[in-house]
Structure formats: C-alpha cells, structure tokens
C-alpha cells in the first residue's frame, strides 16, 4: 500500500501545481453526443410481426407499466395463438429493468440505444407509448438490450415423458406412456406463463392456465375442478387430445410448448376416482326440470351433452348400438393410446350425474326415431362417422381390403383378427397410424415379426397425423411412404390380395384448391402385402333417420344441416359431434356443450311459449 | 394538527436555542433532518429525524415476485446499488440452494468493486464540498462517470444496473470489456496523486477534519458501527475477509485501518480502500479470461417460481459498512418478509446524534458526510 502523503501544512508552491492541468485533457464529459453501449437499456422496441400479444411482459413488469392495447387492424387467430394486442409502456412507471425483454416468449421486445428522448411539442402529450419496430415517435435508434437463448428467463425445454422402448411396446396393446411423476409435473407446470392462448385455441375453451397453475401449486383437486368446468372427458383428453392448445402455446413460438395434455393426465391420474366423482358431482344442479332428452350415440359429443343436460337437471337417456359406451374413443382408438379403464372412469363420472346409458340398442332397428321423439322433448344425434370411405381403386372391393374403422372396432371388441405377415395401410392421418401400429402388434403376436407399410398422398411435411404419432410410428419400425397414391390392388391367381400398386404424387390439389391428385405414372411401385387397409376418412350412417324424415330435413351438400347451436330443421332434432363438426374428441366435446346449451335454451323458450 | 396530538411547546433554557437542519439542506445527505439544540455554536443535543425518504421497500418486496424485486432493491441505496442487488440475490440463492457459476461470481466481484469505487469517489466529492472545496467534487463526479460508462457497457444500465438475478448475472461480459476495465484502472490510479495533492496536502482539510467527530473503538462497537467507520477506529473487520462471500477468499487485498477514529481517519480509510478496490479489480481482470462457463444457473420461469420455505441471512461489505438481507420465505412465489440491515441506519441515527454533541455547528455536515450516512438506506 502506498503511503498517502498528507500534510497538515501545505507548501506555498502548491498552487503552482494547477499549471500542469493546462496541458491535460479535461475530465469533463465531451459535449458531443455519443452512441450508447450496445447493451444499453433505452426505450422499448417491439417487432409487431413477431409479437403475438401474449402479455407475458405485462405480467413480469414489477411497476405495472405495461398495458395491452387492442389493435383492431392486426390479425387475430386463436388457433395459431395470435392476439390483436400489443404492449404499451407507461414511461412514468417503467424502470428499464428489461425483465420484459428477458421473459418475452417470442423475443419480439428489445430496448433501444437511445439515451434521452427528445420529441416535438405536439408529441409531448403523453408518457404512454406503444412501442413498434420504428422507435419512439419514429426516431429509430439501434437495438440495445436483447437476449439470446442462454439469457432467456423462460424455460424453453419441455420435461421429457417417460415411455417404454419400441420393442417392448409392440409386444402388447398396453399403454406405453407412463405419465409424469410429481416432480416432472411441477417443473412442467412452472413453465407456463399464464397467457391463456391455450384457453382461446381450445375448441372447448378449457381452463388450462387455471389447472396448470393449480398443478404447480399441487392443489390437484382444484385442477380437477377446473378441468371439469369444461370437459367431462378429462382422462381421455389427457391421453389422446389433438391438443390445439399446445400449437397455440406462446412458449412454443421459440421452444417446446408446455405439455398441457400430459399435465391434464397427471392431475386426473393423481386424484382418486371417488374424489373426481365428488368434485364433478358438486357442479350438479339440485332441481329437476322434468324434461326428457334422448341422445343417440354414446360418443364424446353425445355424452358431453348428456353430462351438461343432466347437470342442469334434465332427464337424459343415451342409446348406444354397441355393447359399451364410448363411441370412437373406445372403438376407434387403440388401447395402447387409450386404455378402456380410463374411458370407463370418465363415463362413470357422467353416469354419476344421473345420465342413463342404454347399450346394445340400435336406433332405427330396436327403437325408431319416431318413438324416441314421442317419449322425449328433444333428441340429439351424436352418432359420429361409422363407415370407412373407400379409395374405389381397382380391387378395393376384394374381401382382403379392409376399412380401418371396422378393423379397429373389431380389434377393440376383442375379436380375433388374422393378419398376414405383411400389410399396407392407405392414409396419412391419425387413423392410419393407429391402424398400422395395431396391425404391427397383431403381427408380432401372430408371426413374431411386424411388416407394415403406410402410403399417404401428402408429402412428409404435410402428413395429417400428429407429429408425435408419426415419431412413435417410425420408432415402431413402420415404413411411411409419403407422396404415393394407391393405383390398384394386386390380386394373385388364387384370388388373394398380393399387394398394392402405388404411384408417385405430383400434386394433390388443383389451382382452385380442389382435391384433384395428379400422379407421375412413370413411377409405379408394388408393395407386397396380404392385406390392404383403407384409412382415408369416414362417413356417417344415417339409415336411422328413415325415408320420411330424411325427406323433411334440410341438407347441405349431403350433410345434415344444423344451425350454429346444432339444431336441425326439425326443432326437436339436434346433431353434434363428427356427424356435423369434426374431427376429434375435443371438437366433439365442444360440440356437445354447444348442443346442450342450445337444447337447454330451446327447452326454456319452449316452456315459456307453452306457459 | 389534531387536538389529541397537541403538545405544549417546551422552550429550551434561555441560553440555548433550537435549529433544524434539513430535510432539504446542502449540508445534509439526501432528505434527512437533524434537530439541534445549541448553546452558542456548540451543539448540546441532537435528534436525528428520519422518514422523509421512506418508500416502504421492505413492504413492497412482499408484494413482488422473487425476480421482480431485482428491479426494486438497487433503489434503496443510490450511490452503491450493486451491493443491494447482489446481497438480495445471495439471500435468495441461500434459500433456494442455487449454485452460482464461478464466472458469475467473478463478474459480481467486479461489479461490487466498481460500485465501491463510484461510491467512494462520490464520497470524496461530498466530504470536500462540506469544507467548501468544489474542485474535488467535480473531479469525483466526472471520474465516477467514467466508471458508469463501464457499467453501461456490461450491465446495460448506468446507475441502477439491475444486472443480477438470483442464480447469477443476466449477461456475459461484452467482447473487449476487460481491456477497457484495465485502461480505466490505470487512469484512476494515475488520478490518485491529483486527489491526494488537492485534498490531503491541503492545510484546511487536514485541520478541519482532524479531531472532528471522534469515536473510539469501544463506542463504535456499542453503537453498531461497521465498515470503513469501524476500521477508522483501528479494528480491521471486513466481511469480505472475515466471512467471505463470492470469490473474495481467492483474492488478495489488505484491510486499511486508522487509529484516530475522527473525520480525517474516516476519509483516509476510504482513500486507501479505493486503492485496494483497484488492486482487487486488477486480479479480477487477470482471472476472468480463464474462468469460462455459464453466467447463470438454470432458473424456473420467474412467473412461477416458489422459493423453498426458510430464512436466510446474507451479508456483504458495502461501501458504507455491513449490509445484510434477512429474507424469509414461506415457500411461496414472493418473499414473506425481507429485512434489510442498512449500515447507515446506525451511522445516521445513534452515531450522528452522539458525535454531534460537543461539536460546532459548522462541523455537523462534515461529520455526517465523513460517516457516509446514506438516508435512503435508513428509510427503507
């Protein structure tokens, strides 16, 4: 340490020292303006193209300086997770901490390198500024404080889901995804920024932010309560939902979206069935309306409507043609994705609300629709799409060519389905994947080896199946051949199916966007297989309506015409689910709610009119 | 005034009179007041009057998320904000069991020592101004600004850096930063002689500060004095050495002490500390290129971050003395209670009141400034 030479008596020559300063650079700051540091936290810049209006910046702002402003000119798309709102900053409150930048899920926000803002007299009216990419009052300064992926305060990585190895999976139809444990569920739930994009995009508008928060707080009963506000098929949707919520999740813009479906499954799996029944039952109205409603088809749409109507105090009877309730959930989705016990749990909760489900009764055969109409105030059709569509290629009428919905139904009914050592599935959607994977499991059981090929019209980027489903299908050794159209079935001398000829696809749609596949006939392949399964879509079986009613009802290009509530042109007859609005469980649930609300309102109007 | 608050005015004896200094007075740091009872120009009693700067930080913190408090705490002490945010972060890290990467720890030490330099430069300016020497203040403020330029460079903010989060720092150093740091250290070291010539070779300074506001070690310990004020009484106590945090145990530095305990001793201790800070920063600049890795540990989403229940006591050696955060969590997403031990609380209340008695009225400002009492830190 150097000694400080302090003196109690200064030298008379001391003032002369000042002369040396004449030759030195002044210590005062230069007067000319200089650029702020590249990292400087100046005023906000917001890239409106990137910003989705999720309002996470507003939530982290510790000074409540950020308000979301609705801008009608901007695009709004709940399905894509885009809101027509952008953050506005109150610079009377902002403290330039930059936390808004560090948590911004889209990385659209940054701070500029502007030290001091000067503006014209007429711009002085407010501290309240809507930041855009052009800088405050259109005076652009370069970007200062921004973030890289390392500096992000939000967690872009999803918790991995434990699942069995493909070899093990193929041995049985048992469920192979284990579900989150508590630790993983809390960590996954903590990734949510509570923006509510999932709520907006969900067809049923499930309260996902609320139940995710409850899971994070480990109040699982509250999570179940939030789930049951909008969805009685919580176990089912926790496993097989097509999860539009996750496509809209704002974390998914740059990272992996929050695993909303797995979190729902976690909450449902970790609360006892008795408690779930009690929680759902707590939402039931005590009064009986005296109204009787018949529902045809115990699928997700019909049962959701039944649940809602029973909750309101109506007497609901559901008629199901097959031995057990569940519709496509039970007979269309393989049990390795959705075990029967979980469907039974959901349906048991619905039954506990007072819904009567009568199975093995086929309307149109055992009871006519007219009889139902006589005994009930309203009838809801939730019969779904039971017939598989055919490709109508040469040979498709051969008995060795199957429809995927039929085959899947037979497998779930427990019938023995004999499969050849090699099979081809036509189609690129989830049903095709379900079919191929089910066939592979049957082949392993019957032959010890699996050989399934999927041919789809779409190219790999545009395959209709869920990405996760595609990944799992690939892992299980199933070959997916995209951009190949079926040409004809190859039938050998002994009149057995020997394979499928496919031809390369040039394009699927014409210039007007109509379905008109164009093939490259020079590229034809034969896929040898003893079985061809068509999984290219389904259609409804409307025989139950009868000729007279079919005549009376209004139709829209071959589909039953309904208003936005689900009411047909016959006021007592309603329709919901795949029959009118596809294509998955959550849409059916949403449609069931809509029809139930419609029926409830219609019955109330009816009661008023007759009173 | 409401009737129930009414008190009869008690007049001092006829040879005494009362004088209020502050809350707005050039001889008082910040918004703070002293009510003096004087006999002639000798103080016979002094009553400190805080509360003019009360912003309720401790209460505000209970309503904000763990992460949001980072933007709030630097405001508690304007001249030395880095110690506030780092001490808060240390407390939360203790509660959450967060492992701060080595590189972040070195960057934090750099930030703390740069902050100490800015505080001490400010201090010299303030002390000199109480003796009517404004050149020193201008120099101090101008040189401090060069350090603020460095803060701007690596933290993005000049005064309130808001650069630390529990778990590390928010950004890594920009390219070429350490070169700028070394250049600034060279410059500051070259300036020390000028400061000494201007200040310590000054007859007026030495004579006015020697023997002013003296306290002995016994008094200092009884009054809860810490930091440079305690070291000015000859006790070499420094949290950086005696209860090391961050990487101070890997850094060589001395703890300057003076024996006299008067205003001059307090100034000299800080003058020497300035040199020690430069010495520490040189070691940081040497070491940092070799310490690679992340600057922050992985953190949960700040909007859904529960810190485990418990309490922690984190203390650091700020430029004013021992600063500590007592943080209590009930396992929620916000602190349940935070108590801040600001060193100025002791220096500005009991020490200032006691040292004022017997001194002359013109020394009051000097005593307060040499104690480096920071009223915003008293009123939390």
Image (cartoon, coloured by chain):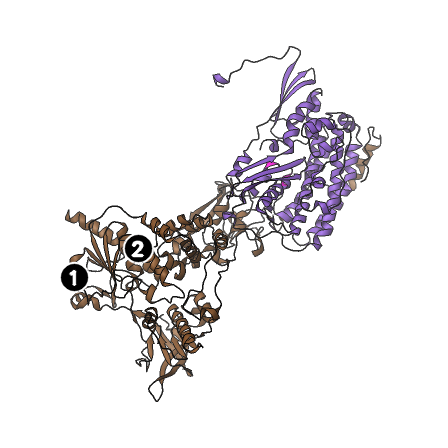
Chain colours: A brown, B purple
**In this picture, is A449 found above or below B150?**
below
* Sequence-first disc among 2 and 1: 2
**In this picture, is A146 found above or below B117?**
below
Number of residues whose C-alpha sits closer than 10 Å to that of mark 1, classed few (under 14), some (14–19) or many (20 or more): few
Looking at the magenta stretch, what is its main secondary structure?
loop
Tell me the residue that label 1 is attached to. Answer: A371
Q: Are marks 2 and 1 in contact (CB under 8 Å)?
A: no
Q: Position of residue B235 (x, y in %)?
A: 75, 33
In magenta segment, residue A611: no
The numbered mark 2 sits on a residue in which chain?
A
**Image disc number at residue A330:** none
In magenta segment, residue B78: yes
Element under label 2?
helix
- Taking the view exactly as shown, the residue that stands out farthest to the top is B14
Stretch in magenta: B76-81
Element under label 1?
helix
- In this rendered view, identify the residue nearer to me: A257 or A300: A300
Going by the image, does B360 lie left or right of B305?
right
Q: Quadrant of residue A247?
A: bottom left
Image mark count? 2
Tell me the residue that label 2 is attached to. Answer: A350
- In this rendered view, identify the residue nearer to me: A284 or A533: A284
Q: In what quadrant of the picture does the N terminus of chain A appear?
A: top right
Could one spot residue B112 in this view of the protein? yes
Tag nearer the camera, 2 or 1: 2
């Amino acid at each position: 340490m150097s000694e400080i030479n302090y003196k109690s008596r200064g030298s008379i020559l001391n003032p002369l020292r000042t002369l040396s300063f004449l030759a030195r650079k002044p210590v005062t700051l230069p007067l000319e303006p200089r650029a702020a540091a590249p990292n400087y936290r100046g005023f906000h810049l917001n890239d409106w193209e990137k910003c989705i209006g999720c309002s996470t910046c507003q939530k982290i702002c510790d000074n409540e300086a950020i308000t979301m402003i609705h801008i009608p000119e901007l695009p709004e798309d709940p399905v894509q997770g885009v809101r027509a709102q952008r953050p506005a900053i109150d610079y009377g409150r902002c403290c330039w901490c930059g936390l808004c930048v560090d948590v911004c899920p889209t990385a659209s926000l940054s701070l500029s390198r502007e030290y001091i803002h000067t503006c014209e007299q007429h711009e002085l009216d407010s501290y309240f500024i809507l930041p855009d990419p052009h800088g405050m009052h259109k005076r652009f300064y370069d970007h200062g404080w921004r973030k890289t992926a390392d500096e992000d305060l939000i967690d872009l990585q999803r918790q991995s889901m434990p699942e069995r190895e493909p070899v093990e999976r193929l041995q049985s139809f048992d469920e192979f995804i284990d579900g989150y444990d508590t630790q993983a569920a809390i960590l996954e739930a903590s990734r949510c920024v509570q923006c509510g994009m999932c709520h907006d995009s969900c067809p049923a508008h499930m309260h996902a932010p609320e139940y995710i928060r409850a899971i994070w707080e480990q109040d699982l009963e509250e999570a179940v309560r939030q789930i049951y506000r909008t969805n009685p098929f919580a176990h089912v949707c926790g496993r097989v939902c097509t999860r539009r919520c996750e496509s809209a999740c704002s974390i998914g813009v740059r990272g992996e979206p929050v695993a909303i479906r797995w979190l729902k499954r976690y909450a449902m799996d970790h609360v006892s069935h008795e408690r779930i029944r009690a929680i759902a039952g707590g939402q039931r109205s005590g009064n009986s309306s005296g109204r009787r409603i018949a529902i045809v088809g115990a699928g997700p749409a019909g049962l959701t409507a039944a649940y809602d109507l029973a909750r309101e105090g109506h007497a609901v009877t559901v008629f199901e043609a097959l031995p057990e309730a569940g519709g496509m959930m039970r007979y269309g989705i393989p049990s390795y994705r959705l075990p029967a016990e979980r469907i039974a749990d959901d349906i048991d909760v619905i039954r506990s609300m007072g819904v009567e489900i009568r199975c093995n009764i086929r309307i149109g055969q055992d009871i006519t629709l007219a009889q139902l109409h006589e005994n009930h105030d309203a009838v809801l059709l939730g019969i779904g799409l039971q017939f598989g569509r055919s490709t109508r290629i040469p040979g498709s009428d051969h008995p060795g060519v199957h429809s995927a919905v039929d085959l899947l139904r037979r497998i779930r009914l427990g019938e023995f389905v004999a499969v050849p050592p090699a099979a081809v599935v036509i189609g690129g959607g989830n049903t095709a994947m379900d079919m191929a994977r089910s066939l592979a499991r049957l082949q392993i059981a019957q032959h010890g080896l699996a050989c399934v090929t999927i041919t789809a019209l779409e190219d790999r980027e545009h395959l209709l199946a869920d990405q996760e489903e595609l990944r799992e299908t690939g892992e299980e050794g199933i070959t997916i051949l995209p951009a190949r159209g079926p040409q004809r079935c190859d039938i050998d001398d002994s009149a057995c199916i020997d394979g499928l000829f496919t031809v390369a696809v040039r394009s699927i749609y014409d210039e007007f966007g109509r379905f008109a596949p164009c093939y490259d006939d020079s590229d034809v392949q034969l896929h040898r297989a003893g079985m061809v399964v068509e999984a290219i879509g389904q259609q409804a079986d409307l025989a139950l309506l009868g000729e007279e009613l079919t005549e009376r009802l209004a139709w829209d290009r071959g589909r039953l015409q309904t208003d936005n509530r689900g009411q047909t042109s016959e006021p007592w007859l309603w329709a919901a689910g795949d029959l009118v609005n596809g294509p998955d469980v959550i849409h059916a649930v949403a449609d069931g709610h809509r029809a139930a609300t419609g029926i409830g309102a219609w019955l109330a109007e009816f009661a008023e009119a007759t009173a | 005034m409401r009737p129930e608050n009414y008190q009869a005015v008690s007049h001092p004896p006829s040879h005494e009179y009362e004088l209020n200094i502050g809350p707005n007075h050039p001889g008082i740091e910040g918004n703070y007041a002293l009510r003096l009872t004087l006999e002639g120009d000798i103080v016979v009693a002094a009553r400190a009057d805080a509360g003019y700067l009360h912003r309720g930080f401790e209460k505000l913190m209970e309503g904000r998320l763990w992460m949001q408090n980072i933007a709030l705490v630097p405001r508690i002490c304007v001249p030395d904000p880095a110690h506030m945010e780092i001490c808060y972060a240390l407390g939360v890290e203790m509660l959450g069991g967060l492992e701060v990467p080595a590189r972040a720890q070195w960057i934090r030490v750099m930030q703390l020592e740069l902050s100490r330099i800015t505080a001490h430069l400010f201090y010299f300016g303030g002390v000199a101004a109480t003796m009517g020497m404004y050149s020193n203040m201008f120099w101090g403020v101008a040189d401090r600004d060069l350090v603020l330029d460095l803060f701007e460079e690596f933290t993005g903010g000049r005064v309130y850096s808001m650069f630390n989060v529990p778990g590390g720092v928010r950004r890594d150093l920009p390219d070429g930063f350490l070169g700028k740091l070394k250049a600034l250290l060279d410059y500051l070291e070259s300036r020390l002689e000028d400061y000494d010539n201007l200040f310590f070779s000054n007859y007026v300074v030495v004579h006015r500060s020697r023997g002013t506001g003296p306290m002995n070690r016994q008094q200092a310990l009884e009054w809860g004095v810490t930091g440079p004020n305690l070291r000015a009484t000859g006790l070499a106590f420094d949290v950086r050495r005696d209860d090391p945090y961050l990487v101070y145990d890997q850094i060589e530095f001395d703890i300057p002490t003076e024996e006299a305990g008067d205003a001059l001793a307090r100034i000299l201790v800080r003058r020497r500390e300035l040199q020690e800070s430069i010495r520490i920063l040189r070691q940081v600049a040497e070491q940092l290129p070799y310490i690679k890795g992340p600057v922050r540990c992985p953190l949960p989403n700040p909007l859904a971050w529960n810190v485990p229940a418990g309490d922690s006591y984190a203390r650091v050696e700020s430029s004013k003395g021992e600063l500590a955060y007592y943080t209590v969590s009930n396992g929620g997403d916000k602190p349940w209670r935070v108590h801040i031990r600001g060193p100025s609380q002791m220096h500005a209340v009991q020490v200032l009141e006691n040292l004022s008695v017997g001194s002359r009225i013109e020394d009051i400002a000097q005593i307060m400034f040499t104690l480096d009492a920071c009223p915003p830190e008293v009123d939390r």
